[in-house]
Amino acid sequence: MARCNFCDADFEAGAGDLLLVCPYCGTAQTIDGVKFTDHYMIRVHYDQGEAQTTLLDWVSKQLGVPDDLAASARFLKSEQIWYPFWISRVDSDTKYSGLGRDATFHNEWPQRRGAYKHIKYFWKPESGQFTRRHEVNIAGIKDIDEDVRHHPIPTRAKEYFSHAHAEEFDGKVLHSNISEDQAKGLAKQIATDRQTQLVLKEVDKIEHRTDNIDIGETFLIHVPVWELEYRYGKRKYKASVSAPTGYVIESKYPRSMSFRAGGIGVGLIMLLIGAGLIALALDALGLGPMLEGGGLLSGGLLAIIGLVLMYKGASRKEAKENI
Ligand SMILES: [Zn+2]
């Protein structure tokens, strides 16, 4: 439990929550009760009904989805969750020197232009500088779903957090497990790693580097996501849809019997062809010096692919697709 330093209400907070949002007055605050003002949100543009319709439209277009899905699906759960993200603009400047791999070529083959008998590799000193501004995005929830973690956030459309706006949709605003200082520390590390990647494109070994990493504007942004669950037939399927953009972040959906049967059929044919090729190759082996390992290999591969397709078709596991 925590007590709001601004409206005195008691509210739920877990042990790992470090930046809290009071569910009664909407004030973002540290666990010591210091108000955090750089608090933004992305506005909802898809209400519950629109998010559901968008999801069913999208799912209906996927390969092998039953024709009656949109008409027969029944929503069991529609919850709007506001996920916290820390956004930092990091100005980074890296001067480096190091060694790059280079080579000299000797004795070109007379018949093959551009091919050489001898290639001599050596290290060559190189130096340079990279100046970049990185926008670093860190999820405020440590065990967040990976698809939600990486979904695109239109940060340019941000506006100040409005408690009333989240309440309008019964949105559940999550506390952040990461404090402002931790977010800045992580942003610095991520920006430094990105600089390292840039340098490693130029040199293979870094000998000296000086980094000037300046953490600029850092803010907390709450992003609303519709967490949906629907029933089709006897099974339940989950999906996440972005409330600002209607983007289907993640969705599981059923595949029709005929689609799965098709998979089993193709798998069976490949298995038979594969078995045939193996038999032919083995036959060649028995006949003597004309053996051909290729048939054995491709036959084996086809048989394996066939078995995988049959397994996928036969398994009742629902499909999942990411965009
Ligand atoms: Zn409050």
Image (cartoon, rainbow, N blue to C red):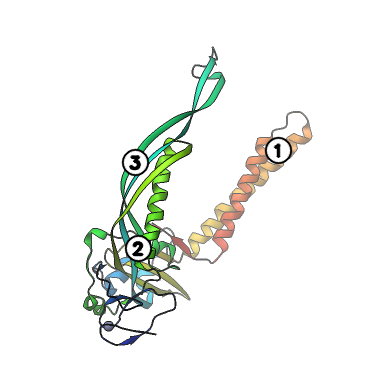
Under circle 3, the secondary element is: strand
> Where residue 26 sits: x, y (%)?
26, 78
**Which type of secondary structure does the marked residue at label 2 adopt?**
strand
The amino acid type of the residue labelled 3 equals Phe
Tell me which corner region of the image, top left, top right, bottom left or bottom right, holds residue 201: top left
In percent of width and height, residue 25 lies at 25, 82
Label 3 crowding class (10 Å Cα cut-off): few <14, some 14-19, many 20+? some
Q: Which residue is mark 2?
A: 248
> Cβ of disc 1 within 8 Å of ligand 1?
no
Q: Tell which residue pokes out farthest to the bottom in this image.
A: 9
Indicate the amino acid at tag 1. Answer: Ala
Q: Earlier in the sequence, mark 2 or mark 1?
A: 2
Give residue 243's mark. none
Q: Nearer the viewer, residue 228 or 81?
A: 81
Q: Quadrant of residue 189?
A: bottom left
Say whether mark 3 is within 8 Å of ligand 1.
no
Q: Is residue 294 visible?
A: yes
- How far is the residue under mark 3 from the one under mark 1? 57 Å
Q: Which residue is mark 1?
A: 281
- Which tag, 3 or 1, sits closer to the chain's start? 3
> In the figure, 282 relative to 216: above or below?
above
Per the image, label 1 sits on a secondary structure element best described as helix
The residues bearing labels 2 and 1 have C-alpha atoms spaced at a distance of 48 Å
Front disc: 2 or 1:
2
Give the label on residue 130, or none.
3
Nearer to the camera, 71 or 162: 162
Do residues under tags 3 and 1 come within 8 Å of each other at their CB atoms? no
